[in-house]
Each structure stands twice: as structure tokens, then as C-alpha cells.
Image: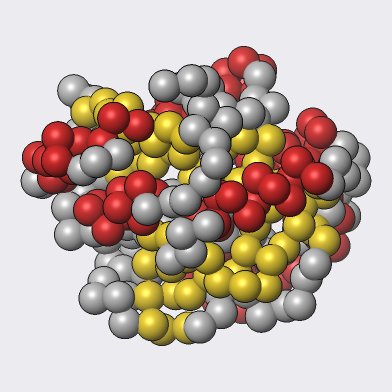
């Protein structure tokens, strides 16, 4: 296989009920370029390993998969960073092992747009929210009618980007992987901010749904309580105040006020 234009990274832990659907949604992609699918299993204590190996052996596109089963659990952030380090493509897409894509032309549409519009460094879309049984809970994850997302919007309290919908320019440096990423308690929002800041570009938001984000009790973030989630977001925004001169302190004060009301 030639060097892939797109690297799809998939972090998984305890996703044996969902991993086949996630992987097959990537392998169903129709494109005129090569992709690679990098799957990092963070030592799952279930049958995920066997299911992934079965897909690799039996699926007609199994050869595009690069699979690693870590011998010891790295933890969410370390596995996230490790998986990004493996990406060789000009662009990176993320699909975690409990989510899935629904549009077979997702990557083609996103690549075509970014290749033709130099002012954008990231392309994201709306998605459905589903439960553990694929029952739709919400038709649209994002209610706002965004078109362009810039640093000013990203540094506000509400993050309008759903991770599994994204394609972004691979501009990650060792500084990002070794320093910037490791100090944040979550990987997605700081990554979007980094990409837009590094490339001096903006993100395009497609109102069409391209995938499904799964909300279930075993999800890394959705399984936490709302107060814990908010505390994590507050920590992220505290770091944003240090790292980005564009940060508006009103965002942090809004989050603190919400946290005070919840407790």
C-alpha cells in the first residue's frame, strides 16, 4: 500500500459489543485515495481482541488495519497520544471503538473540501446520538447553526465539535505529543484548539450527519457524572488561560458559576 492520505485512529477499551460496527464503518468508506486504520486496544478485559483479529483476517479490506493490543493498560490519554503518534497520513480522522460512521463518503467529502479550501484545517459534522442498542436519542448532537468555527468559538464553554466526526490536517509535532497533550485531562478539545492555532486556520462545520456518537454507561466520558465532567472541563479551561492569549476569562467564570449551581 502507498503512503495513506488519511490515517484513521481508533482507541478502544471494553468495546466488545460495539467494535465490529465501528471498524466496519471505517472499512466501508469509498475513496479515491489510500487510508490506514490504526487500532489501539488498551488491554481490554473482554473479547475485543478476538473480534478485531477476526475482522482483520476475514474482511476484504483487513490489510489496511494496523492493530496493537497493549500488554498493559496505558490509560485514556496515554493511549490517545500513542495512537496519534502512529499516524502517517496527511490527514487524521478519529473514530473511537464505541462510535461509528454512517456516511460511506465521509472521508472523501472531507478530503475534497480541505484540499480545495486552504483556509480550513479541520472539517467536522453533525452526528446522531445513539444508545447501546443503536436507538437514536437525538437526531442532531449540535443545535447551533455553525458554518465556520474559529479559535474564539472553540475557547467558549461549549465545544461544538464531536470527535468522531472530525478530519484534520496532521500538524502534530513531538512538542504536542510530549508536552502539550500530556498536561490536559482530555484529548479532543485541546487537540482542536492546537490544530487551529498551529495552522492558523479555521474549522468547517457540516450540518449533515455523518456518524453516530454512542452514549452508554461504559463510555469513557459519558459514564462520568455531570459534576465530574464539569470539573474536567474547568481544568481544561484553566490551562487554556495559560496557553492562549485569545482566551476570554468570561468563559472560565461561566463554567465556575455553573459548577457552583450544580453542587
What colouring style does the render use? Answer: secondary structure
Q: Residue at x 68, y 35 (%)?
A: 169
Residue 158 image position (x, y, % from top left): 69, 66
Q: Is residue 252 above or below residue 93?
A: below
User: Which residue occupies 52% across, 20% down?
Assistant: 3
Residue found at x 48% / y 64%: 103
Marks counted in the figure total 0
Query: Where is 215 relative to 122, above or below?
Result: below
Q: Measuring 43% from the left and 66% from the top, which residue is drawn there?
A: 102
Residue 21 falls left or right of residue 198: left
Q: Is residue 240 above or below residue 7?
A: below
Residue lying farthest to the front in this orientation: 32
Determine which quarter of the picture holds residue 44: top left
Query: Residue 36, how many percent across, how many down?
Result: 43, 32
Choose between 166 and 114: the one closer to the eye: 114
Is residue 51 visible in the rendered image? The answer is yes
Q: Is residue 27 left or right of residue 125?
A: left
x%, y% of residue 140?
56, 79
Where is residue 93 drawn, in percent x and y? Answer: 53, 43
Q: Quadrant of residue 59?
A: top left
- Position of the N terminus by quadrant: top left
* Residue 255 shows in this picture: no
Question: Foreground: 230 or 152?
Answer: 152
Give the side of residue 261 with respect to residue 38, left or right: right
Residue at far top of view: 174
Amino acid at each position: 500500500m502507498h503512503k495513506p492520505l488519511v490515517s484513521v485512529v481508533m482507541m478502544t477499551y471494553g468495546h466488545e459489543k460495539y467494535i465490529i460496527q465501528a471498524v466496519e464503518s471505517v472499512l466501508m468508506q469509498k475513496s479515491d485515495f489510500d487510508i490506514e486504520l490504526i487500532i489501539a486496544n488498551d488491554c481490554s478485559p473482554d473479547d475485543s481482541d478476538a473480534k478485531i483479529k477476526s475482522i482483520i483476517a476475514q474482511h476484504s479490506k483487513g490489510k489496511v488495519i494496523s492493530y496493537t493490543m497493549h500488554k498493559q493498560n496505558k490509560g485514556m490519554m496515554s493511549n490517545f497520544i500513542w495512537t496519534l503518534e502512529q499516524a502517517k497520513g496527511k490527514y487524521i480522522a478519529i473514530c473511537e471503538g464505541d462510535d461509528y460512521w454512517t456516511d460511506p463518503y465521509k472521508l472523501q467529502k472531507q478530503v475534497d473540501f480541505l484540499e480545495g479550501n486552504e483556509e480550513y484545517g479541520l472539517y467536522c459534522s453533525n452526528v446522531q446520538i445513539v444508545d447501546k442498542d443503536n436507538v437514536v436519542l437525538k437526531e442532531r448532537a449540535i443545535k447551533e447553526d455553525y458554518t465556520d468555527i474559529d479559535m474564539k468559538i472553540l475557547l467558549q464553554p461549549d465545544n461544538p465539535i464531536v470527535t468522531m466526526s472530525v478530519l484534520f490536517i496532521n500538524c502534530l509535532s513531538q512538542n504536542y505529543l510530549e508536552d502539550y497533550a500530556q498536561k490536559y485531562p482530555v484529548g479532543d478539545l485541546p487537540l482542536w484548539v492546537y490544530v487551529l492555532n498551529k495552522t492558523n486556520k479555521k474549522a468547517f462545520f457540516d450540518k449533515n450527519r455523518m456518524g453516530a456518537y454512542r452514549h452508554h454507561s461504559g463510555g469513557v466520558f459519558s459514564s462520568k457524572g455531570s459534576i465530574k465532567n464539569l470539573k474536567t472541563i474547568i481544568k481544561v479551561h484553566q490551562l487554556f488561560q495559560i496557553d492562549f492569549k485569545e482566551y476570554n476569562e468570561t468563559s472560565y467564570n461561566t463554567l465556575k458559576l455553573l459548577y457552583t449551581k450544580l453542587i
